[in-house]
Image (spheres, helix red, strand yellow):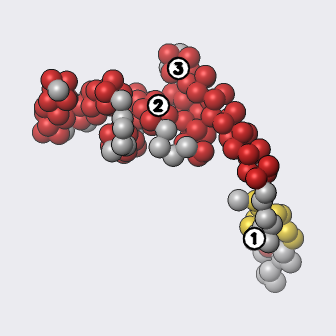
Amino acid sequence: FFFLMIRRPPRSTHCISSAASDVYKRQPLILADHKYDEQDIRHIKSMAEKIVSSALKQLRPEFDELNYNRVIELCNKILAYQPQHSLALFFRASSYLRKKEYKDSESDFQSLLSLPNLGKNLCINALLGLASLYEESSDFDKHLETMLKYFDYRIK
């Protein structure tokens, strides 16, 4: 979305600070009449691919250096362009787990496991991550259930 800063007249009030807070508001700029041609679309896709590629190159080194906030930021950037990017979901879930943000981590691991055509290694690592999450959060029933899924998947 594009935003345009527009000036709104201040409210009639005796309190100067509350009037000043309404001076500028962000309003969406609507581009409904604009038609994109194939060259525009290719350019936009190319830029998105470059952003995703650049962020992917930084993921592993940042994760290894324990920069979990930076990893989450990079993953959010990737997922903005490719919402079902399995590696970004895995690294973000793992980073949330290391930060002990269990709810966000569980959500990402579940999203990852629900993806079609998920590779075997990534599936196994996601199940282990989810089992670890349940163990750390003392949900031993879910931990056991996830470990059984892990062993079943590992045997296949």
Q: Is residue 151 visible?
A: yes
Q: Earlier in the sequence, mark 3 or mark 2?
A: 3
* Residue under numbered circle 1: 32
Residue sitting farthest toward the bottom: 12
The quarter in which the C terminus is drawn is top left
Mark 1 packing: few (<14 Cα in 10 Å), some, or many (20+)? few
Identified by mark 2, the residue type is: Leu
Q: Is residue 100 visible?
A: no
- Residue 151 in percent (x, y) is at 15, 26
Q: What whole-number distance in Å separates the C-alpha atoms at marks 3 and 1? A: 40 Å
Residue 87 — which label? Answer: 2
Q: Nearer the viewer, residue 73 or 47?
A: 47
* Residue under numbered circle 3: 60
Mark 3 packing: few (<14 Cα in 10 Å), some, or many (20+)? few
Secondary structure category for the residue under label 1: loop
Secondary structure category for the residue under label 3: helix
87 relative position to 141: left or right: right
With respect to residue 37, does 42 lie above or below? above
Mark 2 packing: few (<14 Cα in 10 Å), some, or many (20+)? some
Q: Are marks 3 and 1 in contact (CB under 8 Å)?
A: no
Q: Nearer the viewer, residue 55 or 82?
A: 82
Q: What whole-number distance in Å separates the C-alpha atoms at marks 1 and 2? A: 34 Å
- Residue positioned 24% across, 35% down in the render: 134
Which quadrant of the structure image shows residue 95? top left
Q: Earlier in the sequence, mark 3 or mark 1?
A: 1
